[in-house]
Structure formats: C-alpha cells, structure tokens
Image (cartoon, grey):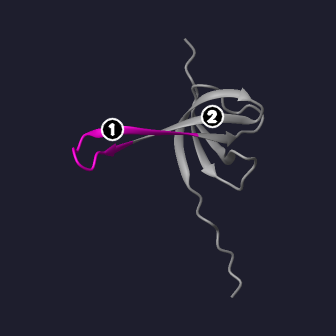
Amino acid sequence: MTEQVEKVRRALVGRVVSDKMQNTVTVLVERRVKHELYGKVITRSAKYHAHVEDGGAAAGDLVEIEECRPISKTKSWRVAKVLEKARII
C-alpha cells in the first residue's frame, strides 16, 4: 500500500542568455502561440534563473531545465542537460 509515487516535473527547453552569476544561468524560453482573435502566430518569451553545477552551461548554449525545490528567492529550476553547445565564431 505504500507505493512511491514519483512527481512529474515540468521541463522546458531554452537558450542561456547570461552566465555571469555563480552556479546560476539565465535561460530564455520562447514559445509560439496563435493570437486568439486575429490568428497570427506570435512569439512569447520568459526568462528563468536555473541552477547549474560547475559551470556546465555557458552563454549561447541550448539547455533543458526542469522544475525543482526553491533554491533561492528567484531560483526554482535547474539545468537537466545541455542539448547543444554554443558555436564560437
């Protein structure tokens, strides 16, 4: 009767726009939605602070973040994995 139920965590994919803080990156998540009246597809965006260990993500990287317990006042997400590294030109 005591079954362990794993909580489903939300996961988002976004681009790292800032890595200037210690153990924290700012991730810009964009989503495309259709305007309810006019039908035009528009881009909505949101920025999240995510916890990262040992500088695993740098500015320009494409990362997947997942929800976690609150780590600080603005941080309740953590970087799950780096999907694509930024190309340096």
Image quadrant holding the C terminus, namely top right
Q: Where is residue 72 in the image (x, y as percent from the top left)?
A: 75, 47
Q: Position of residue 13 (x, y in %)?
A: 52, 42
- What numbered label is drawn on residue 26? 2
Q: Residue at x 62, y 66 (%)?
A: 7
Dot 2 amino acid type: Thr
Residue 68 sits above or below residue 62 on the image: below
Measured Cα–Cα span from mark 2 to mark 1:
22 Å
As drawn, the residue found furthest toward the bottom would be 1
**Which residues, given as a range, are shown in magenta?**
32-47
Residue topped by disc 1: 42
Identify the amino acid type marked 1.
Ile
Res 6 quadrant in image: bottom right
User: Residue 88's image quarter?
Assistant: top right
Residue 42 drawn in magenta: yes
Left or right: 28 as drawn, with respect to 21? left
Mark 2: secondary structure: strand
- The first of marks 2 and 1 along the sequence is 2
Q: Residue at 72% of width from left, 39% of height from top?
A: 52
| Magenta span includes 72 | no
Judged from the image, the secondary structure of the residue bearing numbered disc 1 is strand
Q: Residue at x 53, y 47 (%)?
A: 12
Front residue (pair 35, 5): 35
Judged from this view, the residue extending furthest toward the front is: 37
Judge left or right: residue 69 versus residue 26. right
Q: Is residue 28 above or below residue 75?
A: above
